[in-house]
Image: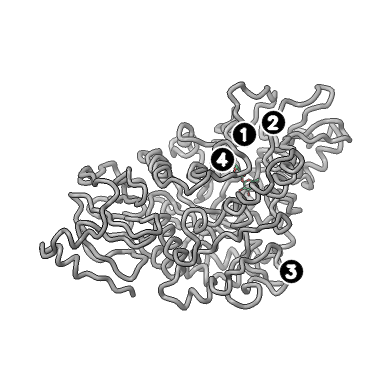
Amino acid sequence: MKKFLLLPLVALTLGLLPVSSQAQTPRTAPSRPAAATRPTAAAPRPEWWKEAIVYQIYPRSYQDSNGDGVGDLRGLISRLDYIKSLGVNTIWLNPIYGSPNDDNGYDISDYRGIMKDFGTMADFDELLKGMHARGLKVVLDLVVNHSSDEHEWFKQARSSRTSPYRDYYHWWPAEKGTPPKRESFFDVKKDAWAFDSLTKAYYLHYFSRKQPDLNWENPKLRQEIYAMMRYWFDKGIDGFRMDVIPFISKDTAFPPLPAKYNGDWGRFYANGPHVHEYLREMNEQVLSRYPSMSVAEGAGVTKADALDYVDPARRELDMLYHFEGMDVGLVPGNSYRLRAPGPYSLLEFKQVYTKWDRIFAQKGWGTVYLGNHDQPRMTTRWGDDRPAFRAASAKLLSTFLLTMRGTPYTYGGDELGMTNIKFDKITDYRDIETLNNYRGLQASGGDLSKFIEAQKTTARDNGRTPMQWDATPNAGFTTGQPWLRINPNYAELNAAAEDKDPASVLNYFRRATAVRRQHKVLVYGQYALLDAANSHVYAYTRTLGRERALVVLNFTAEARSWAVPTGLKLGGAPWLNNYADFQAGAALSLKPWQALVLPLK
Ligand code: ISL
């Protein structure tokens, strides 16, 4: 247990402390008395998935059991007790299906089988049973905007223009000329059309050439997908995370890009003409028939269309996750994930999360995440990975995740405070996005050193380096050659060491999940931003009936003082504090990256 310095709090309550002894440094912005007004909207309807604490696992990088350097299902089974010990209750597994791995499983060649590298269906059944036995729900990835070009459907489709599978994909016959411009995320030339010489036609691929887009306008294709979803639900899974689901419906006339198109193709691809019709159909024919949860990867979804996906009255999906949080601090409209110079703006960060909370204030339900397999490590990106601040900032970020409204998604490894590996050489990268962007930039004579520098902060492989289990060779991840280099900081940053240390990032994370599970105010309570103009401290209250909490997060490496707004009365020892003690008073003295969750009277 941590010890808290309660004395000053008691002294203050009794009026024994002069105000000057409470605030060591001037605060950055005046407090707002408005905090005294409590939000009044009715509490949201309880659901298990609103109370979920999701732990995302990238199986390729979690635990190898057979020495081939790639994580697998048996490895994962061997880590179930660790996963349970985190206090999470829902697991999202990145794709585990048959795949030639052009995009690490996001190119599926067999929707009903298990990737050879990962094991067998018997392994999956055992994993599912092991998770359920521990009270963990299991959510799989649903990747149905595209398949692999090695899927039997595509092999058939490309074999002849008259194949019954031809319409499972989008084709543009060469006799119509060059297809209207569409851009691709992973193509070296950014061209989303690939020419297939056998049938003299172009096929559409929003991602790599090995990821042809499925044609959702074809009802037969949709029935195949729904049957496949039922197959997994009948096995007992509890839900799906839906990969780029806003992209599935296309205008098959492929009109030219509109004049206002500004290269933001994620936005352009989202919300196609029939997407909501198809999601309602999917809900009616599959989702509503199982006690499931669904979460959309909300690529291209904005404030204006978010509720179209998750308003329960529309019977589509349960939740979505947006990208606006991830875009903070990037050069707008730049597809190479170039970072804006200097640190990101906490004001912008607060505005984004506050805006997205508000969208779901009356209906629908949000999500909160700070990293995933497509993002760098949260501690490097949003915290401070220098040795002196790494642990404190990682704990602060977990505090944020676990005290916001909306379902929190924690990415495996972040509970340890893992950091970006920051490769210097392109040859260390394995991710198709980085490799093909590099090749494209090289071909067009772009600035490669600027690109490599930006990748150190933003590249996806930073979030994919193997899990750091212990200080033995290869961090206990594999006895073979790891598929992606392991971060050398595993010698001190690893689960075994952190497990033994009561003050570790890991043990703090465990306390934080326990606090969220214990206090429903942190799940369902209204969120109110305090001190919006403060560019160093992020503070908010959560309110549910009579239960109320104050969250104060110092997002800087300097000590700060933060004045508690008049009208808020601290109500006892902190529920969470990432330092051993704290001084309560009319102003809080915050240490670098200090995070506090305080009950209010
Ligand atoms: O559209 C975007 C932003 O508006 C992109 O970031 C896009 O959503 C993202 O790259 C899609 O990610 C998902 O689909 C990809 C796969 O590589 C990712 O790992 C997956 O999460 C293709 O399946």
In the image, the residue with mark 2 has its CB under 8 Å from the nearest atom of ligand 1 = no
Pinpoint residue 504: horizontal percent, then vertical percent.
44, 71
Q: Amino acid at mark 2?
A: Arg
Side of 259 where 533 appears, left or right: left
Q: Amino acid at mark 3?
A: Asp
Nearer-the-camera pick, 472 or 535: 535
Pinpoint residue 92: horizontal percent, then vertical percent.
55, 56
Q: Can I make out residue 348 in this image?
A: yes
The figure's colour scheme reads one colour
Pinpoint residue 141: horizontal percent, then vertical percent.
61, 51
Q: Secondary structure at mark 1?
A: helix
* Residue occupied by mark 4: 299
Q: Earlier in the sequence, mark 2 or mark 1?
A: 2
Q: Is residue 430 above or below residue 366?
A: below
Q: Amino acid at mark 4?
A: Ala
Residue 68 circle label? 3
Residue 82 circle label? none
> How far apart are the alpha carbons under marks 1 and 3?
38 Å
In the image, the residue with mark 3 has its CB under 8 Å from the nearest atom of ligand 1 = no
* Residue occupied by mark 2: 182
Nearer-the-camera pick, 445 or 587: 445
Mark 2 touches mark 1? (CB < 8 Å): yes
Which residue in the rendered view is the most extreme toward the right? 198
* Residue occupied by mark 1: 265
Q: Amino acid at mark 1?
A: Trp
Q: Secondary structure at mark 4?
A: loop
Q: Is residue 81 above or below residue 308?
A: below
In the image, the residue with mark 4 has its CB under 8 Å from the nearest atom of ligand 1 = yes
Mark 1 touches mark 3? (CB < 8 Å): no
> What is the quadrant of residue 550 in the picture?
bottom left
